[in-house]
Amino acid sequence: MLPTNPVSPDGPPFPARPALALAFAFAAAFLAASPCLPAAAQTAGPGESEYLRLARRPPGATPVRNERTVHRRACRRDTYTYGIGYVRGIDGGGPVDRAVAAFAGDLFSGAGMESIDEFRDDESPCEPDAWEYFSTGSAEAFVVSPSAYSVLFSTSWYTGGTHPVPGFAALNLRADGSEITLHQLFPDSARSLPLFTERVYRGFCSLGHDKAPFIFGYDKPCWGASAGIPEWIEFSEDSLDAAGHSVLTEMGLSINLIGYEAFSHADGPHFMDFPKEVLIELGADPAVWR
């Protein structure tokens, strides 16, 4: 049997860190726009984050790609293409580039290798329509400060069914290649995280849905007394990726949810942008942006 889609409405909203193979990236243009949103802006909505659209890209970064196509032995026209795109040249081949390449390598090597082996060995006869499965994507890199960078990976994963399943994975790095964690961003987590998650809850609920995003649980109503600390914080393993695929930029932080993590596949991806001034008010470490 071939695997089911890796992310579903009945599955956990954010995969554990080892499951990041489910999240690579959309092809993206490398823009050099200047941050120009007002400091007071805090936007939630469907589609693409304005912060990420406007965020400064590392000037030397270029996209690279690893990809492979497997043919089913019992029917050579049936294919499974898997690959990962990432960004090279962020810091001229230094520790950030090495960390991004290693992260992408983990995604690539973990991109359903068991599923691919099972696909190749499937002995079913040829069907009238060829099987064309894939798990593929690319990545975007952003400047956070002179000493920090971030990368957003996205996925498109299809192994049958009505549509491909998308995904995100975020990587936030210091200049030495070490990851910026949730608790490094908010050193006084006991104070900051309830404030942060309440803003996320209220921001997404302001879009007019009766229920909060699935990241707060599958039956959490909007406009409750308090959102509380959701599982995606409690079990995040201190990862900004697990905390809503959060990406840092010079302007602040962008949360990026696929449809299944927000409201539904039909509603599509949703984002929420936090200005750094608001984050600092909530207790974020200003040194992240220096």
Image: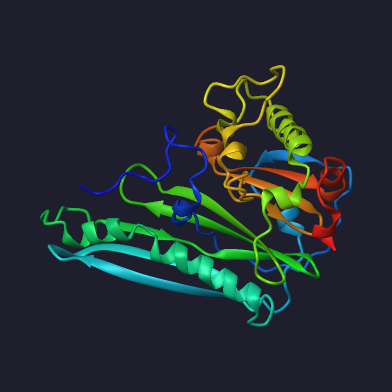
- Which quadrant holds residue 72? bottom left
Left or right of 74 on screen, residue 111: right
In-front residue for pair 138/92: 92
Q: Residue at 44% of width from left, 57% of height from top?
A: 21
Q: Residue at 76% of width from left, 60% of height from top?
A: 55
Image quarter in which the C terminus is found = bottom right
In-front residue for pair 277/74: 277
**Above or below, comparing residue 221 to residue 250 in the picture:** above
**Above or below, comparing residue 57 to residue 222 in the picture:** below
Image label count: 0
In-front residue for pair 245/154: 245
Left or right of 13 on screen, residue 212: right
Query: Residue 88, how many percent across, how many down?
Result: 60, 76
Query: Residue 75, how many percent across, how many down?
Result: 15, 63
Q: Residue at 55% of width from left, 36% of height from top?
A: 267
The residue sitting at the bottom extreme is 92
Query: Residue 196, how many percent across, how many down?
Result: 75, 37
Residue 28 shows up from this direction? no
Left or right of 35 on screen, residue 185: left
Residue 163 shows up from this direction? yes
In-front residue for pair 232/139: 232
Query: Residue 61, how many percent across, how many down?
Result: 66, 76
Which coloring applies here?
Answer: rainbow
